[in-house]
Amino acid sequence: MSSGMNILLILSDEHARDASGCYGHPIVRTPNLDRLAASGVRFDNAYTTCPICIPARASFATGRYVHEIGCWDNGIPYDGEVRSWHHELRDHGRTVDAIGKLHFKGQGCDHGFRKEIEPLHVVDGEGDLLGCIRDGAPRRHKRGGIEEAGPGDSTYIRYDRDNANRACAWLSEHANDAEPWLLQVGFVLPHPPYIAPPDHYDNYPLDDLRMPPQWRQDEWPRHPAIEYLRWFFDFDRPFAKQKIRELVAAYYGAVSYLDCQIGRVLEVLRELSLAENTLVIYTSDHGESMGARGMFGKFTMYEESAAVPLIIAGPGVRGGGACDALASLVDIYPTVLDAAGLPGDRVDELMGDRPGRSLSATVQHPDPERAVLSEYHAVGSQHGYYMLRHRNWKYVHYVDAPAQLFDLDADPGEFHDLATARPARRSVQEELRRMLFDMVDPDATDERAREDQARVIERSGGCEAVIRRGTFDNSPVPGEEAAFHGDR
C-alpha cells in the first residue's frame, strides 16, 4: 500500500462471514460487497476478538485483545483511556470522523475521533450491566425475538439508511481536502431484531433456504457450556423448521439491505473520483448463529459466530484475490496506521507488544505459524472461554468445562470434536493448549474478569439493584429510549 491515502472503514454488526456472495453463499445477495472483494482482497480466515459487541469494538479500536484492556462484556464499554488508532491519527493531524454505531461509553469521553456524527453508544454510558452478573444471573428469555422474525420496519433499518445518507454527504464535503482523511461508517445491521424490509425479505423464498448446521435438537452439541448458553437464553426448546427459515430469510434480507447502503456510499466515492486514493476496509464485529447448534445470536466460538468477513480494496491492493492467512480485528490498528502514512518508526513504537499485523503485510508475506485469539467473558457464561486458531486447527479452552478441538480443513462444519472423539489427537491439543497459555493465563484472566465485573455491580448498587434495573434487547438508536424489562 502507498502512504498517506484516504481510508474509508465500514463496520457492520453481526454479519456472519459466510452470509455474502463473495464468500461463496449460493443465494445471499451482496453485489456491492462482491464487487469490492473482486477489486481487492478477501480474507477467508478472519476472526473477532470476542463474539459480542462491546469487547470486540474495544479491541478493534485499540488493537489489543480483550484481556489486555478489560472491556469484558457489554457492561464495560470503551472509554478512551487506552489510546486507539483514532487518537493516533487525529494527533498526527488527520481528519478522523465517525458516523453511526460505535457502541462506546459516550458521556463526553474522548474516544479519539475528531467528530462523532449521530453515534450509537451504550445506554446511559453503562450498557448492559446485568451481563456483569456471572453467578446466579437471571435468564434472558429471547424466544420472543425469534418468534417475531420476518418482514417489516425497524429503527435499525431507518438508522442505517440515514447513516448512508450522512456518509455520502460527508464524502462530498471532504472530496477536495488537501490532506488524507479517515471516515469510519458504523452500520448496525444485520444485528437483531430479525426484521428485513419486505422487498428484501421476499428475495429469499423460504423453501429455497438451506437449514443451518446441527439445527435439529438431536444434533445439538452436548457440550456443557453450549448447553448452558441454550438454557440461559431460553433456546433449550427447539423452534419449528418454518420459524427458523423465517428468521434466516429476515437475516439474509437485512444483509442485502446493508449491502445496498454500502453500495450507495461506494458509488459516491467513485463519483467523486476518490476511489483511486482511498483504502476501503469492510468488516464486522462478530457473526450470527441463525439457529446453528440450537443457538441464535453470537456468544460461541463456532465459525458462524467467531469468524468475520474482512475485505480490503484500494491503492496497492491486488484485485480479485483471496487470502487464507489468519487475520483478526486487532489487525485493523496497524493497517490503518500504515495506510495513513505515519512514519514507520512511529508505527513500530505504537505497535509495541500489540498482537496485530498489518493486513498488507499479511497479504504480501503470510505467516503460516501465526495464531489468533478470541475470548468470551460475557452474558451467558459462568466462566471464561478462549479460542485459539492455528493453521487448520481450532482449539477452544473452557475454564470450567472440557476443551474442544476441530480440524477445519477436514471438518469445516465443526461436527466432530476431536478433543473427545480422537485421543490420538492429544499431542495436537496439548501443543495448542501450550500456545494459548503463552498468550493468556485462562484461569487468572477469568478471575480478573469476574472481579472487575463484581466491582462494576457494586458501584451500581449491588446485584439486586442491577436486576431491578433490568436490561434491554437491543441498544437504542440516537433519540430512542431503551426498553428495559426484567425476567419475562
Image: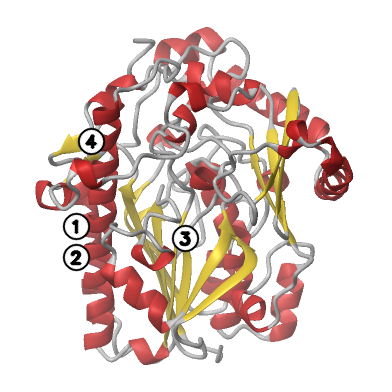
Residue plotted at (74% across, 33% down): 421
Q: Which circle, 3 or 4, is nearer the viewer?
A: 4
Residue denoted by label 2: 165
Residue 256: give x, y in percent of width and height. 24, 57
Residue marked by disc 1: 161
Query: Label 2: how many residues lie within 10 Å, few (<14), some (14-19) or many (20+)?
Result: some
Dividing the picture into quarters, in which one does residue 196 lie? top left
Contact, CB < 8 Å: mark 2 with mark 4?
Answer: no
Query: Looking at the picture, does residue 432 appear above or below residue 330?
Result: above
Question: Mark 2 and 1 residues: CB-CB less than 8 Å, in contact?
Answer: yes
The answer to whether residue 62 of the structure is visible from this angle is: yes
Marker disc for residue 309: 3
Secondary structure type for disc 4: helix
Residue at numbered disc 4: 246
Position in image of residue 273 (x %, y %): 28, 91
Q: Are marks 3 and 1 in contact (CB under 8 Å)?
A: no
